[in-house]
Amino acid sequence: IAAKNLPLMTEGSFMKAFRAKGRMTELLSNIPVHIVLNAQVGLVGAVYCASQL
């Protein structure tokens, strides 16, 4: 869902709302937000975990 709304997530009200948390604003402003664009991310993670067995 986030990948389809990338401009809204990076430039829009999402980041403003994410950061606007009163006394936690400064802390949240320093936390990076990443959007996964690979639709197969779950499968990639499962393959990685299986390869570590």
Image (cartoon, grey):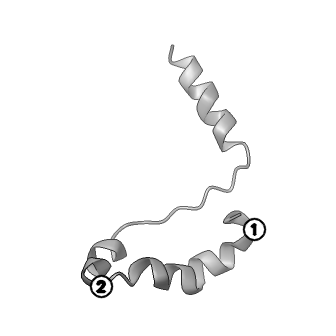
* Sooner in the amino-acid sequence: mark 1 or mark 2: 1
Looking at the rendered structure, the kind of residue marked 2 is Gly
Mark nearest the camera among 1 and 2 is 2
Q: Is residue 19 left or right of residue 2?
A: left
From the viewer's perspective, is 49 left or right of 1?
Answer: left
- Percent position of residue 39, x then y: 73, 49
Q: Is residue 53 above or below residue 38?
A: above
Front position in the image: 18 or 45: 18
- Does residue 17 appear left or right of residue 37 in this picture? left
Q: Is residue 34 above or below residue 15?
A: above
Q: Residue furthest top?
A: 53
**Which residue is found at the position 59% from the left and 34% from the top?**
45
Q: Quadrant of residue 49?
A: top right
Question: In x, y percent, where is residue 52?
Answer: 50, 18
What residue did someone put label 2 on? 22
**In the image, residue 40 above or below residue 16:** above
Q: What x and y, as percent, mark residue 25? A: 31, 81
Residue at 24% from the left image edge and 82% from the top image edge: 23
Secondary structure category for the residue under label 1: helix
The CA distance from mark 1 to mark 2 is 29 Å
User: Residue at position x 57%, y 18% from top?
Assistant: 51
Q: Secondary structure at mark 2?
A: helix
Q: Residue at x 57, y 27 (%)?
A: 48
Q: Is residue 20 left or right of residue 7?
A: left
Q: Pointer 2: residues within 10 angstroms few (<14), some, or many (20+)? A: few
Image mark for residue 4: 1
Q: Look at the numbered discs 1 and 2 and tell me whether their residues touch, using CB distance below 8 Å.
A: no
Residue 10 percent location from the top left of the image: 58, 77
Badge number at residue 44? none
Quarter of the picture containing the N terminus is bottom right
Mark 1 residue crowding within 10 angstroms, few (<14) / some (14–19) / many (20+):
few
- The three-letter amino acid code for the residue at tag 1 is Lys
